Image (spheres, helix red, strand yellow):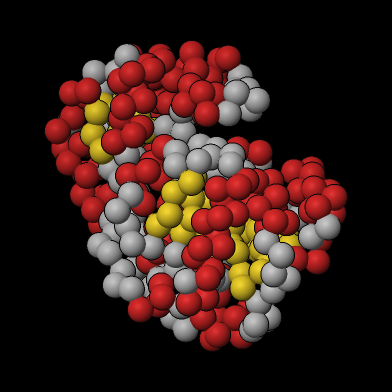
């Protein structure tokens, strides 16, 4: 699969004559391609991963990754000129689990578009999205896969007796297998009427959904960074999230963040009740938004890494 892709890239370069000075790869498949291209062109390779197989498997053993993925990641870690981690947590994983040289790791934290993700009146956002004005909305955003912990959220919602509390699940293919599994769970818990499966939405609409909710919930069993949590906070909304991966550093000491044990239905239930009961979460609109990373910081970090390697 990768050999034809590599050959295609080489053919394009030979056709147009572009001379590349470095390669920046993202994810393990493109990293393996980049190893071959860097060798052929004799240029440095900077690799980033998005997520790492060994970290995901440690947090969620049931979600087995293909064995060739971890082997491929080890090869990339060994051969790349520079590794770009999205958090200190990921840098630690690269060192502890993959044997990476800390001196070859740069940190480029993902950023927030503060012009798009900013506080706005909750009711205005609900009007635009045709959401019920009196409901108290729990919002979860992410692919509808088991590692995202949406099942934990549904079980916690079932324990909250207040029928005005509903959940919006954004992400996943409408009618897909994972979504059907969650629908079946909601039906067995008796909360089908309190759950909306929104499916995928345009990124430009996410800010409205954040603004419309009372609480953003990130119940993942693992997150290498957890950008959803920071986008919600940028919109002035409280976040209840699992104490895993990059979420720990992003939400610890953050006035809008609450961390719970991953997979714990009871802890998630109690945390949600506490935040919802705190002035119906209106307090978030009056809380100063903390400094958050922006994409300019991300690009500056990557530019510095490129400059140093080249």
Residue 196 in sight from this viewpoint:
no
Task: Name the residue located 66 percent from the left edge and 53 percent from the top edge.
Answer: 156
Which residue in the rendered view is the most extreme toward the left? 308
As drawn, is 43 to the left or to the right of 176? left
Q: Nearer the viewer, residue 213 or 129?
A: 213
Of residue 11 and residue 238, the one placed in the foreground of this image is 238
Quadrant where the N terminus is found in the figure: top right
Side (left or right) of 193 relative to 116: right
Relative to 70, does residue 209 appear above or below in the rendering? Answer: below
Residue at 14% in and 33% down: 308
Q: Residue at x 58, y 14 (%)?
A: 67
Residue 141 location (% of width, % of height): 57, 56
Q: Looking at the image, is 86 positioned above or below residue 194? A: above
Residue 310: name its quadrant: top left
Q: Is residue 85 left or right of residue 125?
A: left
Counting labels gives 0
- In-front residue for pair 286/301: 286
Q: Position of residue 3 (x, y in %)?
A: 54, 19
> Residue drawn at (32%, 44%), measured in percent from left and top?
249
Instruction: Provide residue 137's location: percent of width, then percent of height.
Output: 61, 69
């Amino acid at each position: 699969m990768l050999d034809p892709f590599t050959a295609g890239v080489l053919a394009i370069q030979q056709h147009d004559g572009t001379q590349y000075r470095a390669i920046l790869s993202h994810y393990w498949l493109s990293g393996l391609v980049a190893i071959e291209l860097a060798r052929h062109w004799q240029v440095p390779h900077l690799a980033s991963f998005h997520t790492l197989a060994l970290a995901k498997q440690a947090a969620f053993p049931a979600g087995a990754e293909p064995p060739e993925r971890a082997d491929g990641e080890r090869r990339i870690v060994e051969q790349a000129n520079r590794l770009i981690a999205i958090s200190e947590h990921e840098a630690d994983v690269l060192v502890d689990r993959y044997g990476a040289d800390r001196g070859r790791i740069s940190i480029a934290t993902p950023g927030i578009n503060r012009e798009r993700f900013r506080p706005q009146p909750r009711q205005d956002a609900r009007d635009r999205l045709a959401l019920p004005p009196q409901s108290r909305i729990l919002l979860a955003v992410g692919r509808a896969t088991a590692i995202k912990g949406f099942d934990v959220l549904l079980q916690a919602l079932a324990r909250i007796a207040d029928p005005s509390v509903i959940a919006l699940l954004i992400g996943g293919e409408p009618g897909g297998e994972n979504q059907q599994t969650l629908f079946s769970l909601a039906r067995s818990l008796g909360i089908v009427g309190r759950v909306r499966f929104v499916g995928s939405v345009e990124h430009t609409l996410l800010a409205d959904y954040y603004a419309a909710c009372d609480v953003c919930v990130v119940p993942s069993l693992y997150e290498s960074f957890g950008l959803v949590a920071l986008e919600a906070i940028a919109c002035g909304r409280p976040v209840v999230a699992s104490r895993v991966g990059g979420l720990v550093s992003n939400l610890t000491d953050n006035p809008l963040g609450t961390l719970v044990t991953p997979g714990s239905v009871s802890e998630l239930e109690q945390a949600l009740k506490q935040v919802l009961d705190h002035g119906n979460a209106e307090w978030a609109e009056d809380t100063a938004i903390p400094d958050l990373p922006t994409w300019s910081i991300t690009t500056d970090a990557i530019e510095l890494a490129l400059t140093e390697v080249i």
